[in-house]
Amino acid sequence: MSSELLWYLSRATGVVSIVLLTVVVVIGMVTAGRRRPHADRATIAAGIHRWLSLGMTVFIATHIITAVAEGYVDISWLSVVVPFTSGYETVWIGFGAIAIDLLVTIIVTSLLRHRISERYWRGIHWASYGLWLFAIIHGFALGTADQPILQGITLACGVVGGLAASWRVAVSHADTDRRQEIKSQEWV
């Protein structure tokens, strides 16, 4: 495969990855919130979340493999998982590495979900917000420098994800005031 073809494939899979990641994170927020779907809709939403997560993982893996294999810039396998070790755009590649590390953690704990507590799994899964944010920054800084269409796609993903995160935080619990009241009580 030519270096130019690998470069285009890396860019394309990066764009598809950020779109899929945003969709997966938004579906995750909707299914975890207070106004989550019930009955059959919950099963369908969870299934879509899982399948899109798998597809996103395939696109991200292809993005990484083609970025390393392309060879025009110096991105090593080490810099894929160890942040801030790349010889090329150290900070932005480092943000991508942080996103990958968080993704691996989320995947591993999700695969082990039946063996770990719900509370522990949920706490780890909150890292999805950081994963998404690091991926958005990585994509915006590296993949869209001179491409207005790609900038627009990444910016749209940022806006959609930001709005969904705001909604998720705002509607987390119907009894937030009561929880805060109980939390502030002195226990003897």
Image: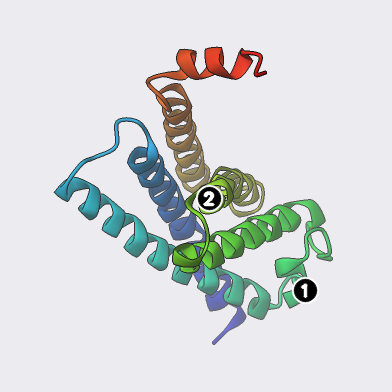
- Label 1 Cα neighbours within 10 Å, binned few <14 / some 14-19 / many ≥20: few
Q: Is residue 175 above or below residue 106?
A: above
Give the SS element for disc 1: helix
**As drawn, 187 above or below 51:** above
Which corner quadrant of the image does residue 48 belong to?
bottom left
Residue at the location (40% across, 51% down)? 24
SS under mark 2:
helix
Q: Which label is found at residue 4?
A: none
CA separation in Å, label 1 and label 2: 25 Å
Residue at the spot 66% in from the left edge and 47% down from the top edge: 141
Quadrant of the image containing the C terminus: top right
Q: Position of residue 36 (x, y in %)?
A: 29, 37
Q: In the image as oriented, which residue stretches furthest toward the left?
A: 40
In the rendered structure, are the residues bearing label 1 and label 2 in contact, judged by CB atoms less than 8 Å apart? no
Q: Nearer the viewer, residue 31 or 57?
A: 31
In the picture as drawn, the residue positioned furthest to the front comes out as 188
Of badges 1 and 2, nearer the viewer stands 2
Residue 178 drawn at (x, y percent):
46, 14
State which tag comes first along the sequence, 1 or 2.
1
- Pinpoint residue 116: horizontal percent, then vertical percent: 52, 61
On residue 78, which mark appears?
A: 1
Give me the residue at 55% from left, 44% from top. 126
**Which residue occupies 54% across, 16% down?**
182
Q: Residue 53 placed where, x, y %?
A: 41, 61
Tell whether 48 sits left or right of 81. left
Q: Label 2 sits on what residue type? A: His
Q: Inspect the image, locate mark 1, and give the three-letter code of the amino acid beneath it.
A: Leu
Please give left or right for residue 186 compared with residue 37 in the image.
right
- Where does label 2 land, which residue? 125
Quadrant of the rendered image containing residue 175? top left
Q: Within 10 angstroms of label 2, few (less than 14), some, or many (20 or more) residues?
A: many
